[in-house]
């Protein structure tokens, strides 16, 4: 019981995290984990790599060429193409 009082009276430890040496909790919060080499790889730093950027661009351009189809659920519960609808005109 007396140990609880002593613990509550302790001063809070303050740690200073910088951009050069971020705290592990900060890295985990933003989805960046340090590598074995010590450098953290984030989406922003990965996009600076030419090979990664070219791969992302190739995938995005291929997806951008796919046709867009709009479907609506019919009265029978089946999906039917929604040609001539205003949302179809926006999507195409």
Image: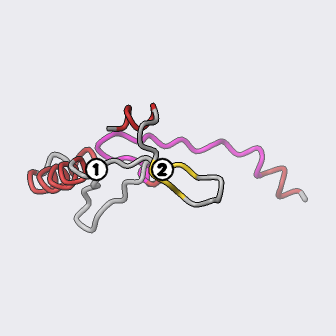
Determine the residue positioned at 19% across, 54% down: 62
Where's residue 7, x and y in %?
A: 76, 52
Q: Position of residue 54 (x, y in %)?
A: 11, 52
Magenta segment range? Answer: 7-27
Q: Is residue 25 magenta?
A: yes
Q: Quadrant of the N terminus?
A: bottom right
Number of numbered tags placed on the structure image? 2
Q: Is residue 33 above or below residue 42?
A: below
18 left or right of 48 in image: right
Considering every residue shown, the one lying at the far bottom of the view is 36
Residue drawn at x 26%, y 44% is: 44
Q: Of helix, strand and loop, which mostly describes the magenta segment?
A: loop
Q: Is residue 61 left or right of residue 16?
A: left
Q: Can you give x and y, in whole percent of width and height, for residue 2 in the image?
A: 88, 56
**Quarter containing the C terminus:** top left
Q: Quadrant of residue 87?
A: top left
Give the residue drawn at x 79%, y 51%.
Answer: 6
Q: Which mark is residue 71?
A: 2
Q: CA distance from mark 2 to mark 1?
A: 13 Å
How would you rate the neighbour count of disc 1 (Cα within 10 Å): few for under 14, some for 14-19, many for 20 or more?
A: few
């Amino acid at each position: 019981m007396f140990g609880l009082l002593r613990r509550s009276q302790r001063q809070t430890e303050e740690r200073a995290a910088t951009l050069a040496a971020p705290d592990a909790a900060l890295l985990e919060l933003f989805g960046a984990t340090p590598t074995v080499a010590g450098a953290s790889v984030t989406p922003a730093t990965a996009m600076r790599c030419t090979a990664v950027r070219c791969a992302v661009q190739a995938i995005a351009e291929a997806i951008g060429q796919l046709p867009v189809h709009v479907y609506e659920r019919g009265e029978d519960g089946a999906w039917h193409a929604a040609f001539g609808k205003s949302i179809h005109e926006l999507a195409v």
